[in-house]
Structure formats: structure tokens, C-alpha cells
Image: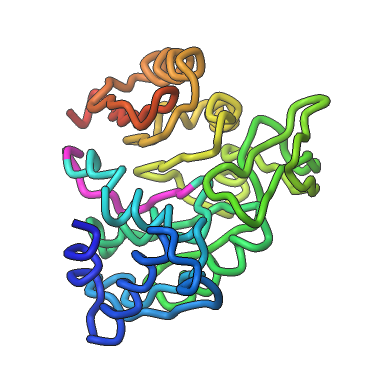
């Protein structure tokens, strides 16, 4: 299956071969790791894709582009024109959304410097995409402790008090979505995609009254308690659950849409 999707995603023979190399990297063949790869793809709104030939990026490629974690977006009752990708990482979620909504404008938020560099390179070649290097939360303008690790993917996260473990700690800027909207830095989005490793409730709070003006949210939640909180906040803002499926033992993919759109 991985090979079939890799062959379909790449536009040229060399792109298909490069994607097969990434599949080998994912399979644990270490000699295929190292360096960066630029591909031409069959996605009109995002025709080029920058990837690192390293396990973190190959895991994301499998989850987002091959297994299509966000395939529930096909159930939306409308076509979004503006999208926020919160926790954009290197942009593979945005690439998938461009395959579904090629004319959409996407603003991606990624605080990790290493991932932001690749995200910026990807967005530079895609239609109507802009990357911002900050986290989204319930405070505006301050710096927060943030965990990064060169050998892990999808695990970058806001650090709680006393938490560090074997992660590398950096300071990143946090912004509120409602402040950015009111300042004219971003438009009220039609769709918000969110994968921020346990900070979902904090980010939703940062939308303030605009929570009820966003037409749809798709987010990965990372514990049953957080999942229930997200549903409660979104339903209170007029959303209904469209899709709710397990991602792992603790994580779920949740899609909600404003009831006026359904």
C-alpha cells in the first residue's frame, strides 16, 4: 500500500523513486536516511514537496499522506476558502488539505525552528500559503517553554511546570488567534486543523468569541479528558460532531462543523 501511494503521489519517475526511498527509510533501512529531498507531486495547489530523509518526516508522510489521517475532511458540507494549520510541522497536513481544497488560503503555525524551516520552504512553492513561527494559545505575546527533539515527530509540545524529560527545551512566542484576527493579521478561518500534542483546549480558548465563527475544526486530541473538553467547548460554540475516530490508544481525530452549515 505504501509503495502504491508513493508511486501515485510523485509526478516524475525520479520523484516516485525518491518516495520509495522514504518508504525504505520508514521501514528501518538506515542507509536510505540522511539529507533532504525535493519532489514534484500531482497536487496542483502544492506541486513541490520538501522532506527530510529521516524517520520523523517519513512517519508523518505515512500518517498524513498515505494513511490519510484527515480523510474525514471529505465529509465537510462546504469548501473552505481560508484554513489555519495549527501545529503545521513541515506542512504535510497542509499538503493534504491542498489536495482536497487547492484554492484555499492556508496559514500555518509552527514554533519549532527546524520544522518551521521546512514548512517555509514548502509554503514558498504553494499557492496562497503563509507560515508563522509561533504557538497558538490563550495568552498573547509572551514566551513559553517548548519541547523539541531531532529524532521524534509529532511530539513537540508546550512544557508544563517541572516537565522536561529527555526533550530539548526552547522558548517560543505564543499568540491568541482572536488577537491576530482583530489585528488583521489573519482572517476568520473557515477551517482550523489542529495537532498540538495536548494543548488543544488552550488553543481553543485563544479563539475567544471567534470560536463560534469558525465553520469547522479538525483536531487530534491526546487524552480522553481533553477530548471531552474540546467537544464541550465546540458544541457550546454551536458546532456538532461530524466525525470522531480513534487515532491511537489515547488520541482521536475529531471533526466538528457549525450546525448552520450542516
Residue under the image location 63 percent in, 35 percent down: 137
The answer to which quarter of the image holds residue 21 is bottom left
In the displayed structure image, the side of residue 47 where residue 227 appears, left or right: right
| 180, above or below 254, in the image | below
Say above or below: 185 vs 225: below
Q: Position of residue 195 (x, y in %)?
A: 48, 40
- In the rendered view, tell whether residue 83 sits above or below residue 145: below
| Residue 244 horizontal/vertical position (percent) | 28, 24
Q: Is residue 115 magenta?
A: no
**Viewer-nearest residue: 206 or 228:** 228
Residue at x 67% of width, y 42% of height: 175
Residue 169 in the image: state x and y as whole percent. Answer: 79, 45
Observer-nearest residue: 195 or 132? 195
**Between 118 and 53, which is closer to the camera in this rendering?**
53
Residue at x-position 32% and y-position 22% = 239
Relative to 35, residue 14 above or below = below
Horizontal side of 257 relative to 115 (left or right) equals: left
Confirm whether the magenta stretch covers residue 77: yes
Which portion, as a residue range, is magenta?
Answer: 75-85
Rendered image quadrant of residue 256 = top left
| Position of the C terminus by quadrant | top left
Amino acid at each position: 500500500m505504501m509503495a502504491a501511494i508513493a508511486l501515485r503521489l510523485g509526478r516524475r519517475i525520479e520523484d516516485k523513486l525518491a518516495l520509495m526511498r522514504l518508504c525504505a527509510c520508514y521501514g528501518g533501512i538506515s542507509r536510505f536516511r540522511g539529507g533532504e529531498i525535493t519532489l514534484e507531486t500531482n497536487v496542483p495547489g502544492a506541486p513541490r514537496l520538501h522532506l527530510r530523509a529521516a524517520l520523523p518526516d517519513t512517519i508523518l508522510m505515512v500518517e498524513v499522506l498515505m494513511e490519510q489521517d484527515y480523510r474525514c475532511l471529505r465529509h465537510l458540507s462546504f469548501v473552505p476558502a481560508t484554513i489555519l494549520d495549527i501545529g503545521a510541522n513541515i506542512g504535510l497536513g497542509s499538503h493534504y488539505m491542498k489536495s482536497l481544497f487547492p484554492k484555499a488560503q492556508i496559514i500555518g503555525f509552527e514554533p519549532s525552528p527546524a520544522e518551521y524551516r521546512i514548512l517555509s520552504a514548502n509554503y514558498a512553492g504553494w499557492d496562497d500559503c503563509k507560515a508563522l513561527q509561533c504557538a497558538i494559545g490563550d495568552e498573547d505575546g509572551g514566551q513559553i517553554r517548548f519541547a523539541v527533539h531531532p529524532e521524534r515527530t509529532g511530539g513537540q509540545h508546550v512544557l508544563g511546570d517541572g516537565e522536561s524529560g529527555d526533550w530539548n527545551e526552547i522558548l517560543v512566542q505564543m499568540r491568541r488567534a482572536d488577537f491576530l484576527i482583530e489585528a488583521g493579521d489573519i482572517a476568520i478561518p473557515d477551517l482550523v486543523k489542529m495537532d498540538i500534542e495536548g494543548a488543544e483546549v488552550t488553543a481553543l480558548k485563544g479563539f475567544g468569541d471567534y470560536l463560534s465563527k469558525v465553520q469547522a475544526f479538525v483536531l487530534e486530541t491526546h487524552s480522553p479528558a481533553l477530548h471531552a473538553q474540546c467537544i464541550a467547548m465546540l458544541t457550546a460554540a454551536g458546532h456538532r460532531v461530524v466525525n470522531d475516530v480513534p487515532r491511537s490508544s489515547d488520541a482521536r481525530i475529531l471533526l466538528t462543523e457549525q450546525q448552520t452549515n450542516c
